[in-house]
Image (tube, helix red, strand yellow):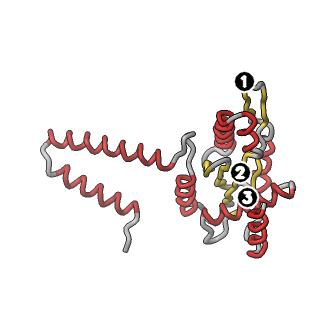
Amino acid sequence: MTKTHSQFKKAAENIETEILASLSPDLQEKFLALMAAKNQEIEEKDQEILHDDYGFLNRKGFVLLASTALKAADPDRIIGVTLVDVTKFKQINDELGHKTGDSAIAKTGAKLADTFSEPHIVGHIGGDEFAIMTFGLSQNDIDLRFEFLSGDIIVENQQKAKKVSIELSHGTAFYKSKDSVSNLLELADDHMYIHKNSQAKPSAIHHIDARIIKAIHIVHNLG
């Protein structure tokens, strides 16, 4: 049977205790200092692996943390995964430069983290996309928060004397038994794509008919 991360951690702690007990007091102090330095190094590497250049959870970090939270969550609580896209991000990069584009990502992430603070989980999963796992929020609650965000994120290029108000598109899928975080991200992506192209007010969907999803992706790829 494959050991889990917690089992490996427990085994390592037991070995560390055994080694510590076998050492003299002066060597114990040196051993503890060495282990503390090693643990700090591991934590720093974990930070690099699970976070992006802006300090936000990356896709791997988001999926890992959200999956852990999903397993520990009250099954009767409303749990959603929202995918967020920075509208016209390419246009911002092209017209105002990549530095302004970086600023747009950093400011968007900071606003989302502030708007959906703990216990909610926010991650920057790549490019101009963010993901949020929410707990206890209905579709209406989520939409209201995005309405407050509308027009609240401003980036500017002082050299070109231009300011741009960041607009966000979002789509949400709500958890049902046996859903994975990756599955919820796919469903939220389908919902967001429908919303972006229909310009309709987003509403919650869960399992879309497989034929509709296939058609959506075919049209998307053709575009």
Quarter of the view holding residue 74: bottom right
Q: Position of residue 220 (x, y in %)?
A: 76, 62
Q: Which residue is mark 2?
A: 84
- Identity of the residue drawn at 73% across and 29% down: 156
Mark 2 or 1, closer to the camera: 1
- Relative to residue 178, is residue 13 drawn left or right? left
Whichever of callouts 3 and 2 sits on the residue coming sooner in the sequence is 2
Residue 9 sits above or below residue 57 on the image: below
C-alpha gap between disc 2 and disc 1: 29 Å
Closer to us: 50 or 4:
50
Number of numbered discs visible in the structure rendering: 3
Quarter of the view holding residue 70: bottom right
Q: Secondary structure at mark 3?
A: strand
Residue 184 sits above or below residue 110 on the image: below
Residue 11 sits above or below residue 31 on the image: below
Q: Position of residue 185 (x, y in %)?
A: 66, 61
Quadrant of the snapshot with the C terminus? bottom right
Q: Which residue is mark 3?
A: 172
